[in-house]
Image: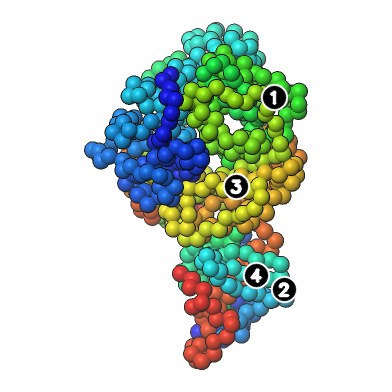
Amino acid sequence: MKTKDKINSILIANRGEIAIRIARTAQKMGIQAVGIRTQKEPNAHYLGQMDVILDFPEREKNQVPEFLDIESLVLLAKRNQVDAIHPGYGYLSENADFAIRCTEEGIVFIGPSPRIIQNMGDKVVAKQIAGKAGVPMLGSSKGSVVTLDDATVIASQIGYPIIIKASAGGGGRGMRIVRKESDLKQMYLSAVSEATLAFNNPSVFIEKYLENPHHIEIQIVGDNFGNVIHLGERECSIQRKHQKLLEEAPSPALDEELRKKITGAAVALAKEAGYMSLGTVEFLLDKQKNFYFMEMNTRVQVEHPVTEMITGLDLIELQIRVARGEKLSLKQSDIKLKGWAIECRINAEDPQSGFSPCLGVVKALRIPKGNGIRIDSGVVAGSEVTPHFDSMISKLIVHADTREEVIEKTLKALSEFQIKGVKTTIPFDKAVLRNEVFRLGDFDTSFIEKDMDSLVYREEKEELLAAFFAAHHYAEQHQTPSLVDNDEDAWTIRNRLNFK
Amino acid sequence: MNSLNKELIALNKESNAEQRFSTDGQGKIQHSVWDNDLHFETDEDGFNFISTGDLRYPVEIVSHHQNDYELLMNGVSYNFSVETPFSIRRKKLLATQASESTSIRLKAPMPGKILEVMVRTGDSVKAGDTLLILEAMKMQNAILASTKGVIKKVHVKEGDTTSKSDLLIELEKEA
């Protein structure tokens, strides 16, 4: 990977809260933060936090979204003599071609080398590397399974339950969970026929299926000199349809011994891969506390702030330092995990109707403040939530000494976090934090469907006060006409409150 | 006209729970059992609050048509219709006499793109069946049948872009 001794400016190929997050660290390091304005949100909040703003060049219609347009982004950086590009998360953050094009044009890509992005993005290669590093993995077929006889042999070797997936896969089609051998024939045949119909490709593969695992991930960072350290784990089991909603660090599911093993496995894998950047190794953990490698993410994660809270480190700074060729100045023994942190993703979604996205204008916003409270927000009062981008508008990150304390502190912060104009997941976050199973720390990825009676938390007397408000508003609007003109008492709130 | 009615009932349209209030005809109301001292205020950020004792909650009116209210209190949705003793009796009577078959006009909850339409005119569906997939905000949203019924007409096709409140599907409700 090409490195530069000096990075004077970084083009942030992203938007929203992560663009602001990256700009903050760049500015702290004396590096110019260069933001990109798109026509979809020319007045977005993140632009106000940049040192320089570049307009995304005009293109023909119907092209890929701006932050996925490799050539335009590289050209924009080159034309404006920007030294480096930070891709953030999502978009092009794990796209090897983008990293290659940056390098070809003499621009530093802030992330690992294209070869590593490619290796980790390929499930088969990633598993080979994990295997060489001695990291435990779920059993699976070595490649495609082409006959029922093969499927029967492989399934009995792996052990039930198993999952059959279409090799050409995606979107759940051609996917079957098989719990016992007598079901295999029918499930195998229907998976093959569905795969053929959906992808014009009958090939399937077989993998061990884990029922309701924990989702635990290890933050690692490596440099160009073969040094790799870990920064502890994050607990990411509070998920809905594989979308994380609330994360914490450390994880209540790990004890010291298991933490040592699982972080050791993550470091071994990263070393085997020759990893040099910030990265995350994701694991599944079963009831018996066996862990299995799932995948490695070669970028900064949405939930990285919980790790920053308990380590006191700036992960974006580490990422930039490694990208400009510096040696890690930290040893593993320098890393001390302190206290407990929780992140609530504040999404413009309605938990009362299947988390459907909510669009609109943030008419007013009040954010909690205090020691150990951090808000990474992509919106301010007046911001519009549009259908062009994902629904996460803000993140609340809270830190305290113990898990019990951080849960209470987060609840208090959530009650002070007020957004007018769009519905959000705040009442859902409250319901999670008040849930007994969550509080005991004994939850897995089935938590939302199995352990939550209600997806929103209702405050004391909330429904009664809402009823009161409706009745009061109605009564206000239906006063005796003769009295309205000359009898305006303190209850006459219609004009004062300016309700729409 | 309501000045003569001394009682108002806030009917929660989801749970059918009723809260009863008395009114003096001049905008002042009192809960039938809960003795209270309520305050309403707007702060400098533009939030409206209702408070009593130690409780102080932000509230906003999402929509308000005649006596129907959709409110957000602490970010949680509540749907009320405010009734008089007379109108609520009439409502209950009408509900028991409601015809067995009514038409539901399903509208787009948000702007987006139709990815897939699962049903055709004449199809029978049951509550919870997926009718179509609407992509918005990079998410695929399944639009579900709210009731058992027959598809009367499909107004969109795959690839269509829709605005909020565009008519998607007409569904004939079956008992």
| Lateral position of residue A74 relative to residue A411, left or right | left
Nearer the viewer's eye, disc 4 or disc 2?
Answer: 4
Q: Are marks 4 and 2 on the same chain?
A: yes
Nearer the viewer's eye, disc 1 or disc 4?
Answer: 1
What is the crowding at mark 3: few (fewer than 14 residues within 10 Å), some, or many (at least 20)?
some
Determine the chain carrying the residue at label 4.
B
Say which residue appears at 44% left-offset and 58% top-offset. A382
Q: Are marks 2 and 3 on the same chain?
A: no
Dot 2 falls on a residue whose secondary structure is: loop
Dot 4 falls on a residue whose secondary structure is: strand
Mark seen at residue B38? none
Mark seen at residue B51? 4
Mark seen at residue B34? 2
Residue at the disc numbered 1: A333
Instruction: Give the quarter of the figure containing the N terminus of chain A.
Output: top left
Q: Is residue B100 above or below residue B40?
A: above
- Give how far across and how far down residue A323 sits, in percent: 47, 26
- Give how far across and how far down residue A179 sits, in percent: 63, 21
Depth check: A357 or A30 in front?
A30
Q: Which residue type does callout 4 highlight?
A: Ser
Q: Which residue type does callout 1 highlight?
A: Ser
Q: Is residue A491 above or below residue A304?
A: below
What is the crowding at mark 2: few (fewer than 14 residues within 10 Å), some, or many (at least 20)?
few
Residue at the disc numbered 3: A374
Dot 1 falls on a residue whose secondary structure is: helix
Res. A172 visible in picture:
no
Say which residue appears at 44% left-offset and 47% top-offset. A49
Q: CA distance from mark 2 to mark 1?
A: 61 Å
Q: Are marks 1 and 4 on the same chain?
A: no
